[in-house]
Image: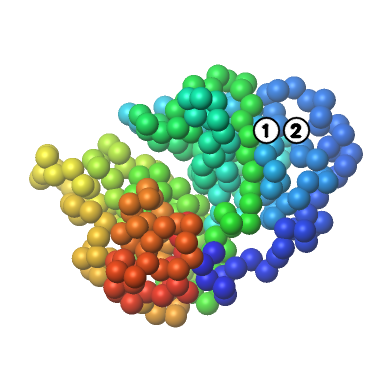
Amino acid sequence: TNDRGLMLPLLCTIATMATMPDPRTYAQSTTQNTNMATMPDPALERCSSCFFPTEFHDAPLVAVKQYNHDTKIFTFGLPPGVSLDLPVCSCILVKGANADGEPAIRPYTPTSSNEQKDSFDLMVKVYEQGVVSQWLNSRQIGAMVGFKHILFNIKAQYPFEGKKKINMLCGGTGITPMYQALHKIVNTPGDSLEVVLLYGNKTVKDILLRDELEKAVKMSAGRIKVVHVLSDKTNIPIPGWDGEVGWVDEEKVKKYCFPPAEDVLTFVCGVPPLYDVMCGPRTEPEVKQGSVLANLGYTKMMISKM
């Protein structure tokens, strides 16, 4: 996380001891068939409660579902009765390959919750030039795919101590870490966090998890507001459309989001240009001078690059 106060108070070596699988389970699971993952070697380093260690461990592709015109849901198997148990908010790394067979690694946040056992789901937009998304799309059912979970990919942690209001700025599949947090917020008794989500897409048909977002809004009793933004202006006006048109930009952040304050946290997730405009590269903890959030007065302690 980019906020010291929100960083996990743990080291990978400590988490290894806390989450180490039973060696007997490991010994038994190594003989299981390829329709399910085996338990990772308990000697491997871990950085959280997540099923996957900090080294790549294989899980089988067990199902693929077409979600919309360019997005699919890939389901991967886990040992029977086992959950991915991924901290909220955090992601996992997928090991794919480019056209030359060289390793290519990308972060993905599952859309399945920790309540789901035996498997987990990744929502993947299959870009024409997407190296890992095209690699995943070419896998057959039963193919083994490598995953790992590292400390860098553990972001601001629920319940976001000291924060009362959350801004979420995202585009496309950048919605997945936002949904991870929203699911936790609306399903935790007594939670009082307020949320504003600004979600950009090209057209209505590109909006991901729309039904799930509407359900979260209904469950929140007015605490969650979702504003959709469409960038394709060729078919405007859209009958029945009550969202915004254009881009997730400074004007819309000022219009809808909670202003800078110590109890405000702003999540950002999307393609590299979105990070660059909003706060600076995902890999850099500092807030980029001249970026939208910097111009509006948000500090490093108020931003989490997801």
The image's mark for residue 58 is 1
> In the rendered image, which quarter contains the N terminus?
bottom right
Q: Amino acid at mark 1?
A: Asp
Disc 2 element: loop
Kindly tell me whether residue 200 is visible in this rendering: yes
Q: Which residue is mark 2?
A: 38
Disc 1 element: strand
* Rendered residue at 55%/49% (across/down): 91
Kindly tell me whether residue 187 is visible in this rendering: no
- Find the distance from the CA under tag 1 to the CA under tag 2: 8 Å
Residue 220 vs residue 237: left or right? right
Residue contact between numbered discs 1 and 2, judged by CB atoms under 8 Å: yes
Counting from the top left corner in percent of width and height, residue 305 is at 46, 60
The disc, 1 or 2, on the residue closer to the chain's N-terminal end is 2
* Rendered residue at 29%/69% (across/down): 290
What is the residue that sits farthest to the top in this orientation?
Answer: 140
Residue 150 vs residue 223: left or right? right
Counting from the top left corner in percent of width and height, residue 166 is at 42, 67
Q: How is the image coloured?
A: rainbow
